[in-house]
């Protein structure tokens, strides 16, 4: 039986073989009785124990992976929102919206604009962008920069 455990002396995670009575930590050389160690995961399959160890150490935990992916995916959008929020004037804000929304979504709707500028100003923004030819209405309600 393989078990994932923490060394009682240096607190580092490692895999031990529960069939032996005692185990020596490869990090600190401390010897402990396997029966007295706290077991976090146990399996006959050494590769499963290794996976559990990796998670305990924080490497490649599935949660972290999913988080990273989410950030990557959300990134062009949050970059746009950041640029928008830090633009110095209205004209620049509109240009950012027109360019970035088109780049991210292909075409966009007033709802997409609303998500960024808020309910109050969405219509104003869209009509001002149309006036300045930053965007054009390629189908009813569908805009493109
Ligand atoms: Zn140790």
Image (cartoon, rainbow, N blue to C red):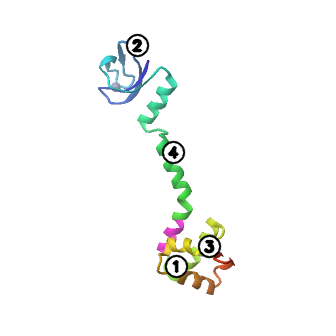
Assess mark 3: CB under 8 A from ligand 1?
no
Q: Position of residue 47 (x, y in %)?
A: 52, 25
Say which label, 4 or 2, has the lower sequence index: 2
Location of residue 54 with respect to 104 vertically, above or below: above
Label 1, residues with CA under 10 Å away: few <14, some 14-19, many ≥20 = some
Q: Are marks 2 and 3 in contact (CB under 8 Å)?
A: no
x and y, in percent, of residue 24 in the image = 36, 18
Q: Which residue is mark 1?
A: 122
Residue holding disc 4: 65
Q: Quadrant of residue 41?
A: top left
Labelled disc at residue 99: 3
Q: Is residue 85 magenta?
A: yes
Q: Is residue 145 left or right of residue 26?
A: right
Determine the main secondary structure of the stretch shown in magenta: helix
Checking the image for residue 19, the label placed there is 2
Count every numbered label the image shows and give the total.
4
Ligand 1 is found in the corner quadrant, namely top left
Say which element carries label 3: helix
Specify start and end residues of the magenta stretch as a single range. 79-86
């Amino acid at each position: 039986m393989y078990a994932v455990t923490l060394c009682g002396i240096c607190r580092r995670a490692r895999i031990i073989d529960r069939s032996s009575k005692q185990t020596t930590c490869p990090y600190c050389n401390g010897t402990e009785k396997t029966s007295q160690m706290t077991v976090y995961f146990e399996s006959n399959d050494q590769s499963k124990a290794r996976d559990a160890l990796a998670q305990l150490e924080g490497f490649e935990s599935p949660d972290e992976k999913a988080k990273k992916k989410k950030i990557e995916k959300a990134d062009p959008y949050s970059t746009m929102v950041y640029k928008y929020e830090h633009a110095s004037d209205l004209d620049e804000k509109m240009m950012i919206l027109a360019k970035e929304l088109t780049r991210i979504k292909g075409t966009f709707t007033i709802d997409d604009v609303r998500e960024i500028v808020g309910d109050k100003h969405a219509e104003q923004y869209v009509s001002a962008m149309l006036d300045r030819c930053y965007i054009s209405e390629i189908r009813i309600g569908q805009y493109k920069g």
